[in-house]
Amino acid sequence: KAKGKGKGRGAPPPCCWPWSGGRPLADRPNGAPLLRPHWRAGARLAPAAALRLAASLAGGLAHLHAKGLAHGDFYAHNVLAHDLGNDGNDDGNGQAGGVEAPPSPAVLVDFGAAFAYHLDAPPASCPAWAFQAFEARAFGLFLAQLAAHGLSSGGDEGGGGGGGFVARASASRALLRAAKACTRPDPSSRPSLAEVERDLLAAAERVGGDKK
């Protein structure tokens, strides 16, 4: 996916494409949660949909990393989500608020803190993997939040399929497993986000199958 999705070598994945729909998963930090965004009460997804959303975002970050770019400000409030299953955002026709359904369940926005780095850095410079590991940690913290606040209740079958208590528990385990790997104390041991994307897609298939 870091190479795109069948759109030619180096093409961006869908979550990097322009899109005007969707709503943020969280509100920006305020005086209470000073450093972490406040997750919106209605921003919940069915288990398989949450895994697909996380995989899409991992793929988008992996695409940036393959180009020597870092987003620099990866938080839930910088993610516009399309399929927020429990809060009525989806009108039942694959659209949100009259906006045509995008090719990805989420779009990454606000590149104001983005920066470039050398993929083949000279010995005296910070290596590329260090910048990527830094962003992997931010993604891991996001996954933990998604597992804690972003999964729909066990009895809900809406919002992208794969509902139910067992599916929710499976999705939570997959998200937390990936979060733990992305936040390992040793940055050099953290997985690439391309690897994380593959693992999350596999988990989504196990939980609810691909959404066609």
Image (cartoon, rainbow, N blue to C red):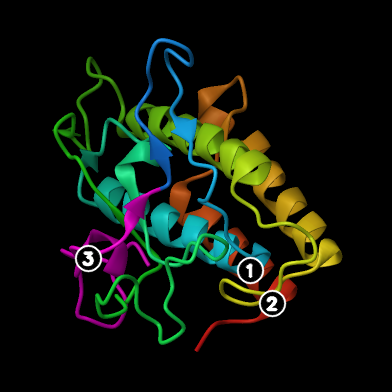
Q: Nearer the viewer, residue 149 or 129?
A: 149
Tag of residue 12: 3
Q: Position of residue 132 (x, y in %)?
A: 37, 35
Judge the density around disc 2: few (<14), some (14-19), many (≥20) Cα neighbours within 10 Å.
some
Residues packed near mark 1 inside 10 Å, few (<14), some (14 to 19) or many (20 plus): many
- Label 3 to label 1, Cα distance in Å? 23 Å
Span highlighted in magenta in the image: 1-24
Instruction: Of the two numbered discs 3 and 1 on the same chain, state the one appearing first in sequence.
Output: 3
Q: Which residue sits at x=36%, y=38%?
A: 77
Q: Amino acid at mark 2?
A: Gly
Q: Earlier in the sequence, mark 2 or mark 1?
A: 1
- In this image, 186 relative to 148: left or right? left
Residue at image position (21%, 30%) is 121
Image: 56 above or below 121: below
Q: Secondary structure at mark 3?
A: loop
**CA gap, disc 2 and disc 1:** 5 Å
Q: Tell whether label 1 touches label 3 (CB within 8 Å).
A: no
**Residue ID at (64%, 77%):** 161
Marks 2/3: CA distance?
A: 26 Å
Residue 6 falls left or right of residue 145: left
Q: Which mark is residue 48?
A: 1
Mark closest to the chain's N terminus, 2 or 3: 3
